[in-house]
Amino acid sequence: MGKKQSTRELDEEYSFSVYGCGNAYCNHCFAAAFTLPGGYNHDTGIPFFQQKPTVIIFVIANAFSLVFSSTSVLVFLSILTSRYAERDFLEMLPKKLMLGLATLFFRS
């Protein structure tokens, strides 16, 4: 059998893997913010489909997704850098994990 991991090691491992997922999605949202569907007019720099409702919905949805994924990255980063006192495991850690997972869920 393998060695047993402590709660701290499990917490760090879980937070780091979810942090990586949130970070990758945050980078994806940031890149999507600068590449609108349809492209840009090279003479004026204005997007071709600027007034289309679908592009406006895309921009708003991408903004919400960027905010939620950035929040999840910050929450899981705060878990990784937090101190490990008994109070943290009993009170703060479950709240932070639920907030981080909720923001990861709502980013989609």
Image (cartoon, rainbow, N blue to C red):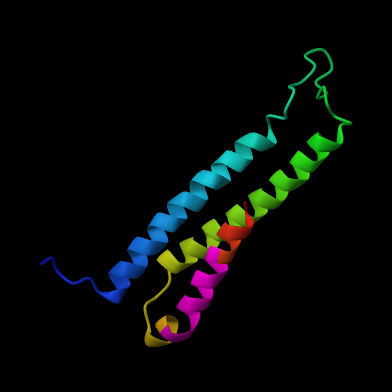
In the rendered image, residue 79 lying in the magenta stretch gets the answer no
Residue 44 horizontal side relative to residue 16, left or right? right
Which residue, as the protein is rendered here, is positioned at the far left? 1
x, y percentage for residue 84?
37, 78
In the rendered image, residue 97 lying in the magenta stretch gets the answer yes
Residue 95 horizontal side relative to residue 86, left or right? right
Residue 58 horizontal side relative to residue 97, left or right? right
Which residue, as the protein is rendered here, is positioned at the far top? 43
Determine the residue positioned at 54% across, 46% down.
Answer: 25
Determine the residue positioned at 44% across, 57% down.
Answer: 18
x, y percentage for residue 80?
41, 65
Q: Quadrant of the N terminus?
A: bottom left
Q: Is residue 91 above or below residue 107?
A: below
x, y percentage for residue 59?
76, 41
Q: Is residue 1 above or below residue 36?
A: below
x, y percentage for residue 20?
44, 51
Q: Which residues are magenta?
A: 90-101
Q: Is residue 79 above or below residue 44?
A: below
